[in-house]
Structure formats: structure tokens, C-alpha cells
Amino acid sequence: MRLTTRGRYAVTAMLDLAMHGGEGPVCLNEIARRRDISPAYLERLFRNLRRRGLVCSTRGAHGGYQLCRCAGEISVAEVIAAVDESLDATACDGDCGGLTHDLWEELTQHVRRFLETKTLAELCEARQREDAARELREEA
Amino acid sequence: MRLTTRGRYAVTAMLDLAMHGGEGPVCLNEIARRRDISPAYLERLFRNLRRRGLVCSTRGAHGGYQLCRCAGEISVAEVIAAVDESLDATACDGDCGGLTHDLWEELTQHVRRFLETKTLAELCEARQREDAARELREEA
DNA sequence: TATAATCCCGACCGAATAGGTTGGGTATTG
DNA sequence: CAATACCCAACCTATTCGGTCGGGATTATA
């Protein structure tokens, strides 16, 4: 199992899309600028996201990307899987005769369940609540 | 966060040590043979385990390694940390201004807690129960 | 119709690191 | 002294991560 900036970038970008995708497609350059991610690299990631059916694209000027499903129906696990990060802690291909096989299996299940139940919508809301709270504090 | 064979090897070897360490030290060649791990590589891992105070060594003929503490007081998390695998999913050094920072933080906590509460003794027992059950089945 | 914006795609690259090896030590037992 | 074992630094190879490059194809707009 590995969790690198790749999955993080993907989730961040998808979240950005969920937040700014109200009307019309959002272009990658915008996301890249807002989130400070290399545009070319982001493009590579979106290639995968599109192929997995998580986003759809509009080409040409004023084009960009949109979520294919509503944010409540896209899990973080899916996004990470799309950019090809394995969420498998065992990695011993079936029966490795291992003393510890069950342990890694259990751990993998834990992580997987956690990420499968988190949706983009949830993260979006959490963020908005946070922002609201901060504004309130700053007014006071 | 990454979880590779390194941590797996370390935990497996420590478990082996917990199971066979009843009387006197156990030498690496034995463990390597039993668990099918490269002896030289295992040695490298044990260097770290020793430096972290998880095992102590006896040099010379009939030498080997022993657990420094009893198996119930060594957590899987410690073993993995000893061989230098980071259990951090965030890896964004403090405030990365990230939309998703909280998510990774939460995930890291989950994983960490899981591995911190698993001790070698527990895994040992689980294994022994398993073996007993299998024997029973085979007798029938 | 030209041009700019945008997605699309394969190929490449440097650095890090995982897993592993080699070749030398040093200590202890018999 | 020889065999067994720990100790250690340096090296090797393959993978992959984050990222770039150079070129398409498609669409909106001036």
C-alpha cells in the first residue's frame, strides 16, 4: 500500500471541481493555479479520472471538466484507485504462507472502508462549515 | 504513507522470534530459512530493530537475537517504525493549505491506532488458535 | 477564417528508494 | 584455531514518483 501526493492531488482536484463546478466545465489551468499543482501533471491525472468515468470533458475554448456523477456518489477510494494507487497492504498475491497475512488483510479492510465511505460531498460540506466558522471568528 | 514488504518482513521475523525465543537466542539464518527471507536483507532490518531497542543480540557461536521486551509490550507499529517506514499519510509538512489535509490526518490516525494496539503476543495467540483449529479439522 | 483556449496523448527524464548483495570486519564457543 | 554468528558500509538494479515536452484534435470567438 502506498499513499503519495498523486492520490492527494487527485482528491484535491476533484474536490475543487465539486466546489466550482456549479455552472459549466472548469479548466485544468484554473484548478492547477488554485491548488498549486503542475498543470501538465494534473492533466495526466485527469486522463485516468476520465477513463474511469469519474469526470467528463468538454474540449475547445471554454472547455474543461465536470464531475460525471454528483459529488455525493463519488468516494475518495474511487478517486485514488483511478489514479492507480493500490490500497492493498498485503501485496503477497494470495497465499504467501505468511504469519502476518491476516493482519495486513484486516488493515487493508480498515483503510478501504474508511475511504469508501468518504464522499466528495462530505468533504465539501466539512470545508464549508470550516470556512463559515473561520469567518465568524474573524468578524468577532 | 507506504507499507511494503520491509515492514512485513520485520513483523514476520519478530513474530517468529516471539514464537521460537522461549529458550535462548535465535539466529537469523533460522528465521530466514523458516520465513523465506534473504538472510542478508534480514540482517539489515535487524540492525534497525536493535538500534530501536526492540531486540538484543548475542554474538558468537550459538548467538542470535531475542526480544528485548515481552511480546505483549511490543506493538506492530513500533516494529514498522523501527525499519523506517513512515506511517504518515499527510506528508505535507505542516500546513500545506490543503483542502484535504484533515482527511489524511484522520486516516493516519486510524491506521496508527490500529497498528499500535496490535501486539506481537496477540498475533502469536491468534496464530496458535488457528493452528489448533486446523489440527482439529485434520483429525476429524 | 484565423487564433486562442482547451483537452488529448505518448514519450521521456531525474531523483528517490525498495529490495537485495558483497565483502569485509568482530565476538564467542568448542 | 575454526566455525558460527553478529556487525557494518558500500554497492547494485529495477521500479516508480513527480514532472516535462512536443505535438496533435476540437471548439468558441473576433
Image (tube, coloured by chain):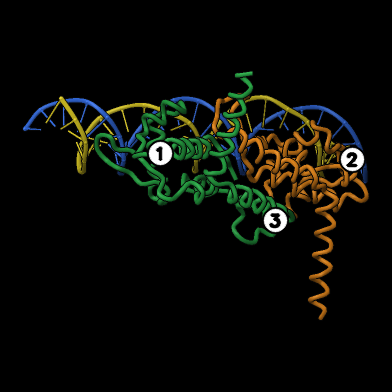
Chain colours: A green, B orange, C blue, D yellow
Asked where in the image residue C9 lies, by quadrant, the reply is top left
Q: Position of residue A53 (x, y in %)?
A: 40, 51
Few, some or many residues within 10 Å of mark 1 (<14, 14–19, 20+): some
Q: Position of residue D15 (x, y in %)?
A: 50, 43
Kindly report the distance in space between the C-alpha atoms of the residues bearing marks 2 and 3. Answer: 24 Å
Say which residue label 3 marks: A101
Viewer-nearest residue: B75 or A111: A111
Say which residue label 2 marks: B69
Q: Nearer the viewer, mark 1 or mark 2?
A: 1
Q: Position of residue B67 (x, y in %)?
A: 86, 42
* Circles 1 and 2 on the same subunit: no
Q: Please give the chain letter of the residue carrying mark 1.
A: A
- The circle drawn on residue A21 is 1
Q: Earlier in the sequence, mark 1 or mark 3?
A: 1
Q: Please give the chain letter of the residue carrying mark 2.
A: B
Amino acid type of the residue that numbered disc 2 sits on in the rendered structure? Arg
